[in-house]
Image (cartoon, grey):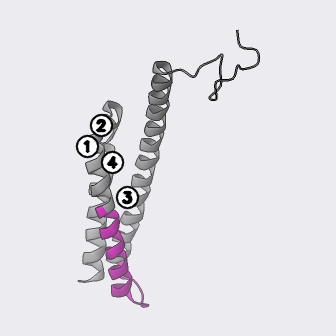
Amino acid sequence: MTALALATELLDLLRRAADDAEALAAPLRALDSATLLEWAEQRQAVRDHAAYLEQRLLAAQGDGPRDAEVAAVLAAVRAEASRLQRIDADNADRVGRTLRVVRGFASALAPAPEAYDRSGRARRGAP
C-alpha cells in the first residue's frame, strides 16, 4: 500500500472512531453497560489497527520528502485525532459525573454508621 492509501485509511478509521465516541453520550447517561462494554472492545480494536497503520505508514514514507497530497491527509489525520481527544475528554467528564451520582446513590442506600466504627467501638462525639 502507498503512503497516501495508508494515511487515508487511518483518517477514515479516526473519523469513524470519533463519530462512535460522540454517540456514546446517550449510553453513558443511561448506564447501558452492554453497549459501553461492546464499545470498549471495539475501541481497543481501533487502537490496535491505528497503531498498525501508523507503523506501515512510517515504513511507506521512508526518509524522503513527503508528497503534498500525503501531507494534506496527514494534517487531516492530526485534526481528527485532536477531535477524538476532545470527545474522549468530554466522555471522561460524563463518566466522572455518573460515577459520583452512582456513589452518592449507593451511600444513600447503605450509609456509614455514625455512632460506631468498623470494629464496633463507639465513635467520639457520636450522639
What amino acid does circle 4 point to? Ala
For label 4, the SS is helix
| Labelled disc at residue 80 | 3
Q: Earlier in the sequence, mark 4 or mark 1?
A: 4
Residue that numbered label 4 is attached to: 21
User: Do callouts 3 and 2 mark residues in contact (Cβ within 8 Å)?
Assistant: no
Residue that numbered label 2 is attached to: 27
Q: CA distance from mark 3 to mark 2?
A: 23 Å
Characterize the local packing of mark 3: few (<14), some (14-19) or many (20 or more) Cα atoms within 10 angstroms. many
| Residues drawn in magenta | 45-69
**Residue 19 in view here:** no
- Residue at the farthest front position: 120
Q: CA distance from mark 4 to mark 1?
A: 12 Å
What amino acid does circle 1 point to? Thr
Residue that numbered label 1 is attached to: 35
Q: Nearer the viewer, mark 4 or mark 2?
A: 2
Q: Quadrant of the N terminus?
A: bottom left
| Labelled disc at residue 122 | none
